[in-house]
Image (cartoon, rainbow, N blue to C red):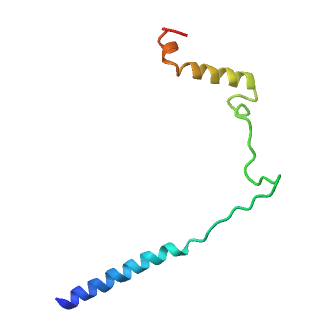
Amino acid sequence: MRRAIRVTLVAAIAAAAGLGLAGCGEEQKVTVYQQGKYKGKPDAPPWDSPQWGGKQAAWETEVNRRTLNQNEYVRVGQGG
């Protein structure tokens, strides 16, 4: 009985040590920024998509329409 407790205790200590050391393996990542050198994905305006086809005015009109639909008074016809 004593031996089973000892084996279990040793296994628990080994598992705890293994988990504790697993967190030490992560390397720190440092981003180096250089002035004027963006290396990420190029940004495109939201209206430059297949849905809007580069029509900025149509995109702005749709955004404004969606914004008005978020106003409860305008949606139910009590104000606006």
Residue 59 lies, with reference to residue 39, above or below; the image says above
- Image location of residue 41, percent across then percent down: 73, 49
Left or right of 73 on screen, residue 36:
right
Foreground of the two, 56 or 31: 31
Left or right of 54 on screen, residue 23:
left
Considering every residue shown, the one lying at the far top of the view is 78
Residue at (67% x, 30% y) in the render: 51
Left or right of 1 on screen, residue 45:
right
- Image location of residue 29, percent across then percent down: 64, 66
Residue 72 lies, with reference to residue 34, above or below; the image says above
Considering every residue shown, the one lying at the far left of the view is 1
Foreground of the two, 57 or 31: 31
Considering every residue shown, the one lying at the far right of the view is 36
Foreground of the two, 26 or 42: 26
Residue at (19% x, 90% y) in the render: 2
Residue at (27% x, 87% y) in the render: 7
Foreground of the two, 32 or 69: 32
- Image location of residue 70, percent across then percent down: 52, 22
Residue at (71% x, 22% y) in the render: 58
Considering every residue shown, the one lying at the far bottom of the view is 3
Left or right of 36 on screen, residue 77:
left
Q: Quadrant of the C terminus?
A: top right
Residue 59 lies, with reference to residue 79, above or below; the image says below
Q: Quadrant of the N terminus?
A: bottom left
What is the count of numbered marks? 0
- Image location of residue 53, percent across then percent down: 74, 29
